[in-house]
Image (cartoon, grey):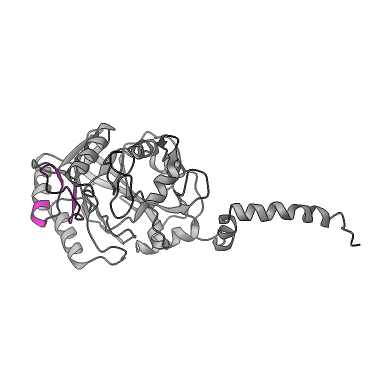
Amino acid sequence: MMKCSRGFLPLLLSLPFTLLLLFCFPGILQIARNAPPAEGRFEPVEPISVPVHRETVRLVFAGDIMTHSQQFRAAKSGDGYYFAPQFEKVRGLLSSADIVAGNLETTLSGSARPYSGYPRFNTPDSLLDALEDAGFNLLFLANNHAMDYGTDGFLRTARTVGDHSFYVAGVDEGAGNILSVDVRGVRIAFLNYTYGYNAAPGQSKPGPRPAILKYERVLEDIAAARESSADMIVVYPHWGIEDSSRVADEQREWARAFQDAGADIVVGAHPHVLQEIEIRSGEGAQIAAWSLGNFISSQRSPSQRASVLLAVEIEKSDAGTCVKKISIAPVHTERSNRPGVSRRVVPAPPWVAESVVAALKIKSADLPEKADGFGYYTIFERTSGL
């Protein structure tokens, strides 16, 4: 009869428990197998979790906020839906800003219709509670899924977002498309448009629509914003080629024209992957970020799960208003085996952060050695006034 040594017996007794753990939580083995060593250019940062006093106005832009069926099914809790855990790991990155804005690429068409993911999105209203808790206070609504449930669905979405005390951009009610926000004396105009929207029943009914991206119209709105004494103009177009890192020549031409007309910040959405960032530094810095990728979704490829938070700090003085600082925080949507969470946004691990910087076409050598107190890496900073 074989005898077990004292060292072998505990190992033998623990084997059934280990097999049970791997059976119930297969992601443990997957994580261990796929995770590269945690070394390289980026190190984990613990950002501040409360706003701090500063002289500049800080804007943070996130990418596409998508809610596929995996996410709302996991968020089901009793009679409601609880989305907060999907964003809890990035609250510190968002809490440092005066304005936190993202592309709400779903509808809030109500429980009278089925909750659904792709290709026609309808998400429980409680998503807004989670976004607000995470730090968002401005949502762009003009995108190709805005009319997934027709005019009624879009109208309900816009009203529900507004009732939750979010700033709302991208709603065309026939009286202009300029959202003007005064942040501690800095007047910022937000202009949001989409190239179009997917066909669906109920769209022929009269009512508000998402603002449509038309070259002359954007130039007219920029001029109107300037005439209304806007200190800073943000254009947020839903455009580009899905799942492509390439920026179309027409986009570059349009963005340059928008900037020449007076737009300071151009941030794009729709491709669901990252595209490059371009900074024009002259008398006043201007930035074009063609696509920030998916802030959260259940899309599967690594490029669809990598994203970035873009922070822009604005300084106003007697000489004028300018972009003072631009910084980035790479983030990542990870799969989770936690009860109630199938996907969640987290600060990007080092190997993902490196791919984010490469996709943005930023040279790693141009980045500071460490992130700032907000958890962001500076990519531009003005050292003198206008």
The residue lying toward the viewer, choosing from 222 and 114, is 114
Which quadrant would residue 19 be assigned to in this image?
Answer: bottom right
* Percent position of residue 137, x then y: 30, 37
Against 27, residue 92 (above or below) is: above
The residue lying toward the viewer, choosing from 315 and 251, is 251
The residue lying toward the viewer, choosing from 219 and 194, is 194
* Percent position of residue 181, x then y: 21, 37
Is 96 included in the stretch rendered in magenta?
Answer: no
Residue drawn at x 60%, y 59% is 29
Determine if residue 385 is in view: no
Residue drawn at x 43%, y 53% is 333
* Percent position of residue 318, x then y: 20, 38
Instruction: Please indicate whether residue 120 sits to the left or right of residue 28 in the image.
Output: left
> The N terminus appears in which quarter of the rendering?
bottom right
Residue drawn at x 23%, y 48% is 146
Q: Which residues are magenta?
A: 192-218
Instruction: Please indicate whether residue 101 sits to the left or right of residue 259 in the image.
Output: right
Which quadrant would residue 176 be assigned to in this image?
Answer: top left
Determine if residue 228 is in view: yes
Against 279, residue 75 (above or below) is: above
What is the count of numbered marks?
0
- The majority secondary structure of the magenta stretch comes to loop
* Percent position of residue 347, x then y: 46, 50
Against 344, residue 360 (above or below) is: below
